[in-house]
Image (cartoon, grey):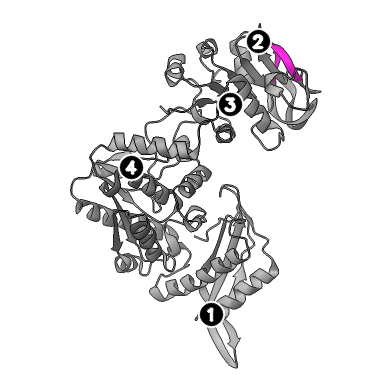
Amino acid sequence: MPQHEVVLVLDFGSQYNQLIARRVRENKVFSMIVSHDITAEEIRRMSPKGLILSGGPASIYGARAPKPKKEIFELGIPVLGICYGMQAMAHMLGGKVTKARKREYGHAELIIDDFEDLFDGLDNKIISWMSHGDFVSKLPAGFKKIGHTDNTEFAAIADRTRRLYGVQFHPEVAHTPKGSRIIANFLCNICRCQGNWTMQSFIDDTIKNIKNKVGKDKVVCGLSGGVDSSVAAVLINRAIGKRLICIFINNGVLRKGEAERVVKTFKKHFHINLKYVNSESRFLKKLKGVIDPEKKRKIIGHEFIRVFEEEAKKLGKIGFLAQGTLYPDVIESRSAFGGPSATIKSHHNVGGLPLNMKLKLVEPLRELFKDEVRLVGKAMGLSDEIVQRQPFPGPGLAIRVIGDITRERLDILREADVVVLEEIKKAGFYREVWQSFAVLLPIKTVGVMGDERTYENVIALRAVTSADGMTADWARLPYDLLERISNRIINEVRGVNRVVYDISSKPPSTIEWE
């Protein structure tokens, strides 16, 4: 268990679970999402400073409704129930939950009746975000009302003797503007957290844990140059030095200068034991004539694993395989209501490292969200070029060259890609958009250059805004920026005479073209 303060988030199936955990971490308190039916004994062993019961889609009086163990309310640990979590607590402790005549969804004005602890420092009325079809109609013994709305009498409740609190609204979402203050009040005023979890404390603890776990064994890591594998490699290297062997495979579909950048950064700057494998010809031979995007993905994934295994076998006895698994990957591998699973998904930029190598896993980032990984990378000296890098697909440029993949077509796309990224960065939009890239289309169009007719390739420009990549909208880039990108590509990239801009959203389109 972590040595720092921890608050547990009990998962009842809410879409906002990860958001709750992130809000806690914003207050420098470590949070973990656990199953709703975790036992009191398991909680006691973890010694949390507080418990947060999440929302959820069920009705607590339903036959199959997920319920917490009643004993957790007797541990003397502060509890905050949110929406369904509040209803579950009220129900388990003798209160009554009733189906509402009309589901309450959206903004509601919360009138605060008691400004002690949870609502300390807030105004008389605040905007709250409601999303519920049931409500607490009768309070359990020992509870009192501390907030209400026009539609909900018990919008916030408290039993201060047992340090049990509940809110019918969602303080974790941006739609409750003062919600972050409410969560901070719970952590500081009620749980008495000091806020000692920082990226530096994480780095120190993780290095110590890696040393203890790995012992004198060697660790092999598939390094892609992306954020996750880069941060994981630097962390493990700090812990065990040359006993970490990173394998970087040039699969032939990387961006211009990518291989050279990775070797320079990790071998020369961080002095990591890096093995560079140039398999460009091998991958391109396998991809020759392949048009179907799924076949491209599978070929690259399977070939990567073969090359990785071949190279790993040359290293002698290896005890561990390092992976850049993140906390959302761990959470998503669990059951619908958060039942912890021992099976963690394998993640790699091309679809899964070879776990059949019978190696034990070391996953130093499996407790972190993506933004926290970036902060760790920054704290360890990784450049913004790596830490703030936009998502790049595992199959690389293979799925941005639509149709047949040849060296010539890849080189055209690489040159166009350089222009796009240079201009996007120069205009200050690189961090503003989720992804920005060029796509080489499988068609040619007529053009005129000088006095001559041309018949050359088309580049599609794609730039999208998004919070998480699940949905996305096309970026409204300034016309003068689009003009500069188009002019430079057509003038500087031999073989291109037309540039188009993709104005499709996701859904119905995807971010990548293949």
- Within 10 Å of disc 2 (Cα), the crowding (few <14, some 14-19, many 20+) is some
Residue 62 rendering spot, x and y as whole percentages: 59, 18
Q: Is residue 221 left or right of residue 216?
A: right
- Separation (CA) of disc 4 from disc 3: 36 Å
Q: The residue tagged with tag 3: helix, strand or loop? A: loop
- Within 10 Å of disc 4 (Cα), the crowding (few <14, some 14-19, many 20+) is many
Pick whichever of labels 1 and 2 is earlier in the sequence.
2
Q: Are dots 4 and 1 in contact, CB under 8 Å? A: no
Residue 96 rendering spot, x and y as whole percentages: 67, 11
Foreground disc of the pair 4, 1: 4
Foreground disc of the pair 4, 3: 4
Q: Which mark is residue 54?
A: 3
Residue type at tag 4: Ala
Q: Which residue is mark 1?
A: 492
Pick whichever of labels 4 and 2 is earlier in the sequence.
2
Q: Which residue is mark 2?
A: 95
Residue 439 rendering spot, x and y as whole percentages: 52, 67
Q: Which residues are magenta?
A: 135-147
Residue 501 rendering spot, x and y as whole percentages: 62, 67
Question: Which quarter of the image is occupied by the N terminus?
Answer: top left
| Residue ranking furthest to the bottom | 451
Residue 150 occupies quadrant:
top right
Pick whichever of labels 4 and 3 is earlier in the sequence.
3
| Residue ranking furthest to the top | 141
